[in-house]
């Protein structure tokens, strides 16, 4: 909106308005606006949640010392979503399809989380959607995003070739072009591409959701991941940087960087209230929305492999749950004292704040490693 008004319509009337033509300027504005929206309205929003008695229910099988958190306002993710959405609509060139796809990823997974949170609150227990219901809705949302991308690919606006760390020339094509010929002749190519998109988005969304178990843990890690993704998006959509780093470029995808900036800023603002001891939890509406948005951006800029490192702690948390379930089922005993992994360290005697800070450090190291691979290629 503001991009159209201040740059496209009015920049010739006053020179400084030309700044709105620079992506970097609008990224900074989006990040600051999102952060301020979250921080300014955070206190009021928390009071509204308390007034409506929207409190967190703590699962009984979890650490007993977490029971004192029962009743803490939850569903703070609604504020995060709004704080991302507003600057994205204000500062992006809305003619670009990429911010709209990212917004769809944010809102669709946020809606699934909202339904899950609402079910828990209405039942007054930590039981929302069933696993089948949750996965079914997540798969449908991911499938829709994959289908949105196919027309963009046919118009030459979106590449299905992946960037691979350390390897310049190896760029596997998810539509199997070059192996099977035209993907329109081989339906298997579409199934393979859509399946990959589904695995990326569903895996990322659930991993962030599983990590959101300690005060500020998921928020801090998301700041790191979203910040790194902002850098990757800018590099991968800038003609000169993409050429220099030999990245699979996304033509016209620069506007997606503004969305990433808003994602980072909103999470920074939310951490102000979510830091230990938390005044509010983001709930499934927040964690699923953030995970869905992060996965969508990775798919759009073709950095699905680097996402594993950028969101390294998220991935480790998700894998720890899979390993725990598999170990109990096939070996008859647990691999960890408790899953996700952050609860394992709590049971080892680590203070909650120590687990949080150390996981942040690991997340930062992994994100920095992911960024260094750009040059190492």
Image (cartoon, rainbow, N blue to C red):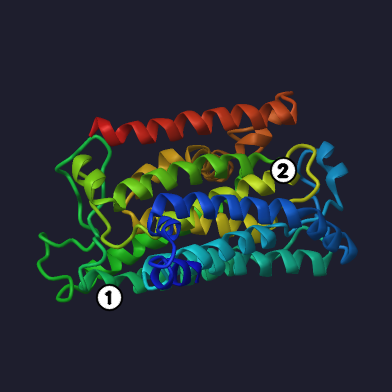
Q: Residue furthest top?
A: 349
Residue underneath mark 2: 272
Location of the C terminus (image quadrant): top left
Q: Is residue 262 left or right of residue 238?
A: right
Establish if 216 lies above or below 375.
Answer: below
Residue 9 percent coordinates (x, y): 41, 73
| Left or right of 219 in this view: 225 | left
Characterize the local packing of mark 1: few (<14), some (14-19) or many (20 or more) Cα atoms within 10 angstroms.
Answer: few
Report if the CB atoms under discs 2 and 1 are less than 8 Å apart.
Answer: no
Of the two numbered discs 2 and 1 in the rendering, the one whose residue sits closer to the viewer:
2
Residue at point 77%, 56% (across, down) = 74
| Whether residue 135 can be seen here | no
Determine if residue 242 is in view. Answer: yes
Left or right of 92 in this view: 34: right
Say which residue appears at 37% left-offset and 45% top-offset: 232
Residue 327, horizontal then vertical, whole percent? 54, 40
Rendered location of residue 174, percent (x, y): 24, 59
Could you say which is closer to the camera, residue 282 or residue 239? 239
Q: Secondary structure at mark 2?
A: helix
Residue in front for this viewpoint, 324 or 92: 92
Q: Residue at x 87, y 53 (%)?
A: 71
Q: Secondary structure at mark 1?
A: helix
Label 1 sits on residue: 151
**In the image, is residue 329 above or below residue 114?**
above
């Amino acid at each position: 909106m503001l991009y159209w008004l201040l740059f496209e319509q009015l920049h010739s009337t006053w020179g400084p308005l030309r700044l709105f033509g620079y992506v970097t300027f609008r990224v900074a504005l989006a990040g600051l606006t999102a952060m301020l929206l979250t921080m300014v309205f955070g206190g009021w929003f928390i009071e509204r949640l308390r007034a409506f008695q929207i409190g967190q229910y703590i699962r009984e099988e979890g650490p007993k010392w977490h029971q004192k958190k029962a009743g803490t306002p939850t569903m703070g993710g609604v504020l995060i979503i709004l704080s991302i959405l507003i600057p994205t609509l204000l500062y992006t060139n809305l003619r670009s399809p990429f911010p709209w796809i990212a917004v769809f990823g944010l809102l669709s997974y946020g809606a699934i989380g909202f339904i899950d949170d609402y079910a828990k609150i209405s039942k007054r227990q930590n039981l929302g959607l069933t696993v089948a219901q949750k996965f079914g809705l997540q798969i449908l949302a991911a499938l829709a995003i994959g289908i949105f991308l196919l027309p963009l690919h046919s118009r030459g606006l979106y590449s299905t070739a992946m960037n691979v760390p350390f390897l310049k020339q190896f760029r596997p094509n998810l539509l199997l072009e070059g192996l099977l010929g035209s993907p329109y002749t081989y339906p298997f190519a579409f199934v393979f591409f859509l399946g990959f998109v589904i695995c990326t988005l569903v895996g990322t969304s659930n991993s962030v959701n599983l990590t959101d178990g300690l005060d500020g843990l998921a928020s801090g890690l998301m700041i790191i991941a979203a910040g790194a993704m902002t850098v990757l998006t800018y590099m991968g959509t800038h003609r000169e940087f993409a050429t220099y780093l030999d990245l699979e470029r996304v033509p016209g995808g620069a506007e997606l960087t503004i969305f990433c900036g808003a994602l980072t800023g909103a999470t920074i603002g939310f951490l102000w209230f979510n830091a230990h001891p938390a005044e509010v939890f983001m709930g499934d509406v927040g964690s699923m929305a953030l995970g869905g948005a992060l996965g969508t951006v990775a798919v759009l800029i073709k950095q699905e492999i680097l996402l594993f490192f950028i969101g390294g702690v998220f991935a480790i948390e998700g894998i720890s749950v899979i390993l725990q379930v598999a170990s109990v089922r096939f070996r008859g005993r647990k691999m960890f004292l408790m899953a996700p992994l952050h609860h394992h360290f709590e049971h080892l005697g680590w203070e909650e704040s120590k687990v949080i800070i150390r996981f942040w450090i690991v997340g930062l190291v992994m994100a920095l490693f992911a960024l260094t691979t750009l040059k190492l290629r």
